[in-house]
Image: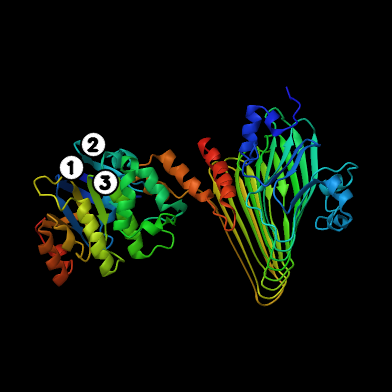
Amino acid sequence: MLKIEGLQVKIGEREVLRDINLHIKEGETHVLMGPNGSGKTTLLRAIMGFGGLDVTAGHILFKGRDVTRMPIHERAKLGMGMLFQRPPTIAGLKLGKLLAVTSGDRAGMVSEYSRFLHMDTFMDRAINLGFSGGEIKRSEVLQLMVQQPDFVMLDEPESGVDLENISLIGTAIARLLEKDVHIVNRKKSGLVITHTGYILDYLDADYGHVMCDGVFRCHGNPREILRVIKTSGYKECLACQKI
Amino acid sequence: MPEDIDRMEDLSATDRERLTQTGLEVGMKNRSGSFFQVDQEIKQVAALEEGIEVLSIQEALAKYGWLEEFSWNLVKKDKDQYTRFVADQPDPRGFVIIARKGSKTVFPLQTCLFLAKTAVQHVHNIIIAEEGAELHLISGCASASYTKTGSHIGVSEFYVGQNARITTTMIHNWGDEISVFPRSAARVEENGVFLSNYVCMQPVRKIQMSPVADLAGKNSVARFSSIVVCTPGSHMDLGSVARLSAEGASAELITRAITTGGTIISRGMIEGKTRYTKGHIECKGLILKDGIIHAIPEIKGDVVDTELSHEAAVGKIAKDEIEYLMSRGLDEDVATSTIIRGFLDVKIAGLPESLQNQIDAAIDSAEKSGF
């Protein structure tokens, strides 16, 4: 699904990602952990194709195509989607209107998905304007459910969300990633940034990666990595020689 | 060649379309009355609902002696060269609309001022909503497709009685060599509501206006909303003034302005003259192509217990908003126009749905032509 080879990214003169190699196969969910400012969000933004950063070396291959220089919307059309940690507020643009524009032949599903995520009363509200933390994330997940990407990037889906909403969002994301489908037939893939790991209760991630200072320090079982980080913080990752 | 126009139906298909874009129903469907003036000739005066009277100003002044007091009362004859010009006319044109006590129109009343051949079109209008009356006006002002130059000068005086409500929605569709100078003022009595909406999405050489609302009665309300797109070569000097002269009075002045190369001066002035009054000015401007948006919000409080505020922002569309929509699969152009459409989408509380639809349609039409 996604293959990243030797990716190097600069923001201005500063090198923020170095020698990133990552391979996410069809049906797999990977977890990305790391201290604040380590480059996790930048990696997601580079994969999606956002501006404000320069890919100075390496390639991003998606479904076998080199998308490194492809515009954002073409990557989205190819099947990439992203849940933003802090999406922008767009005054005047109603959530319902955006969903109408993006849903295409899934227009009939909008009302079912919005009821499922308790967002059916938000259709006439401007996107993210005055939304609570949980409402922002529910709106993000709803937009992704309507978009139905094959590869979903989730930037801290549980941050700022209460326990009740985590359960709802977690269940919806599990649907998005086809966790109800047998692993052999599962087509959807994901890359999830999490600090707390709460979301993993719903997702059964396959692989974990730890990023520190713009490089991968560790790859392995996500629950195992989370356990180590919870007990010792990231200092053990920084000291680890096993890269 | 310009044809003789006696009815809206006589207009060419192109000009009927130009009128439709200003919200006018050529066939009068869902309208409570109509006034149609071409150049200086009044073509149609009709009231279709009980309690509503529509007259030409000459006829009205001859019929009702008491109307003299309402004429040149809110707008002074010597206010400026344009008011003097209209006042000096021996043969005044324009309309008088009276919504009698307690009358409530379901459908809006339409007034159409159409500039075809004359160099200067001038009108003097008086609009009265008596106690408890509710009146919705849609004023479509347009020039013929073949009219290249000309001026329109309109004086309008609005009287909103106790517990009465007037909404007036003006949609302009002029030509790029037409100059327009409306001069309007309103007086709002106790618990009265005056909503004034202005939409201009099409080229105009120059428009200059600054309607004034005097909130003279307790708990009276005025809200001015302007939605404009200013194309290259257009100069729009748009303002509105609210005077909070009685306890409990409140006013809101809202502007959404886009320039694609023209000049917009957006003025707003609220004066809190009495205690327990409230006012807010909000001006948001987008510069899509090099042009000028000059926001000049002014608030002046004369006493304690008046609450006045303003916010103004001028800039470009935020890149993160465009990229956000692109990540949902919209290309850059569609993402941009979707954001602009949202920017202009001001829902006006208290406006009948049909009039809100007309405003939306004017924006839709501008969106289709790529703003």
Residue closer to the observer: A163 or A224: A163
Q: State which chain disc 3 sits on.
A: A
For image coordinates 59% across by 48% down, the residue present is: B355
x and y percent of residue B209 in the render? 72, 50
Is the Cβ of the residue at disc 1 closer than 8 Å to that at disc 3?
no
Label disc, if present, on residue A148 of the rendered structure: 3
| Three-letter amino acid code of the residue under disc 3 | Gln
How packed mark 2 is, by other alpha carbons closer than 10 Å (few <14, some 14-19, many 20 or more), is some
For image coordinates 30% across by 47% down, the residue present is: A109
Using the rendered image, report if marks 1 and 2 lie on a common chain.
Answer: yes
Q: State which chain disc 1 sits on.
A: A
Going from N to C along the chain, the mark reached first, 1 or 3, is: 1
State the scheme by which the image is colored. rainbow
Using the rendered image, report if marks 3 and 2 lie on a common chain.
Answer: yes
x and y percent of residue B59 in the render? 85, 46
Q: Residue furthest bottom?
A: B304
Label disc, if present, on residue A1 of the rendered structure: 1
How packed mark 1 is, by other alpha carbons closer than 10 Å (few <14, some 14-19, many 20 or more), is many
Q: State which chain disc 2 sits on.
A: A
Residue closer to the observer: B31 or A223: B31
Give the secondary structure at mark 3. Answer: loop
Residue closer to the observer: B285 or B226: B226
x and y percent of residue B1 in the render? 73, 22
Q: Is residue B218 left or right of residue A195?
A: right
Quarter assignment of residue B231: top right
| Three-letter amino acid code of the residue under disc 2 | Asp
Marks 1/3: CA distance?
15 Å
Q: Is residue A22 left or right of residue B207?
A: left
Give the secondary structure at mark 1. Answer: loop
Q: Which residue is mark 2?
A: A66
